[in-house]
Amino acid sequence: MAVLSLDHPWAFAFGILGNIISFMVYLAPLPTFYRVYRKKSTEGFQSVPYVVALFSSMLWIYYAFLNTSVSLLITINSFGCVIETIYIVMYIIYAPKKAKIFTVKILFLLNVVIFGLILLLTLFLSEGPRRVRILGWVCVAFSVSVFVAPLSVIRLVIRTKSVEFMPFFLSFFLTLSAVAWFFYGLLSKDKYVALPNILGFTFGVAQMVLYLIYRNKKPAVIEVCKDPELGLAIGKISATEKGAEVHPIDSKSPSSSDEESSEQGEQSNNDRAIISGNGGEESTGNVEV
């Protein structure tokens, strides 16, 4: 890292900036889990975003160990592994039985089986620069799949004319994170770090523009409650951002909805933080490449 800071001071500066922003994004779900701890209930929220964020951090740590020119990815993604593990453990403690079983299954499948296969295949079937290239493209493919998920958010905002699930400041900081990690990858001459964040920046700007367009629009509340397709869309949103949450949508009475709206609104503002620890955010785990 000392060599990097001397030979590429701007790359080092953008890497530090990316670490700082991604650190804050990783901490965004803390209010959610304080609420979970206080109420001893996960209240229907999903664990998938945290499991995906953990997988993303593990991938980028492995990549950074193979490619030492991007060593600043190790620091933020190590923190990401720790904080996401804490989130997942808390979720398992307080979630209903079915949710616990589902979380353990997907955790084992993604973070043990799939990551283990990637580890074994890259270690034993490739070596040197070829190993770095293979793992780099795996990281790019995963990050791109995560970055595409905001299309569900964009579609939801357009259809409902509501920005409840797309708080401006979170989109703003995720965009800044994408910019920081893009320049870190560019100046470090690492296309695998830089490429996914181009997409992250594009979707981040699109979300902020939509927020400015629809922030004063009256949301189509009734349509959202009755449209199961939109409920599915919100479910997809959760896997794209670190700490994102899924708010259960059902056809409750108006009075019940009114009582919960303010609480859920506050919830969503804290919980859409990103898969991406290295700035690949989700956009986790990159704060995500």
Image (cartoon, rainbow, N blue to C red):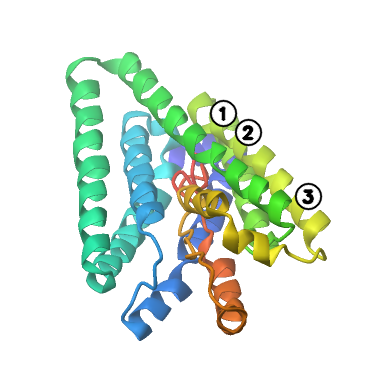
Residue 195 - label = 1
Q: Nearer the viewer, residue 41 or 241?
A: 41
The mark that comes first in sequence, 2 or 3, is: 2
Residue at left 21%, top 66%?
97
Residue at left 24%, top 15%?
126
- x, y percent for residue 188: 53, 30
User: Visible in this render: residue 275?
Assistant: yes
- Which one is in front in this view, the residue at disc 1 or the one at disc 3? 3
Residue at left 72%, top 44%?
206
- x, y percent for residue 60: 38, 39
What residue is pinned by disc 3? 209
The mark that comes first in sequence, 1 or 3, is: 1
User: Which of the image's four quarters has the N terminus?
Assistant: top left
| Mark 2 vs mark 3, CA separation in Å | 17 Å
| Mark 1 vs mark 3, CA separation in Å | 22 Å
Q: Is residue 117 above or below residue 263?
A: above
What residue is pinned by disc 2? 198
Compared across the picture, whether 241 is left or right of 261 comes to left
User: Visible in this render: residue 190?
Assistant: no
Residue 80 occupies quadrant:
bottom left
Q: Is residue 252 above or below residue 92?
A: below
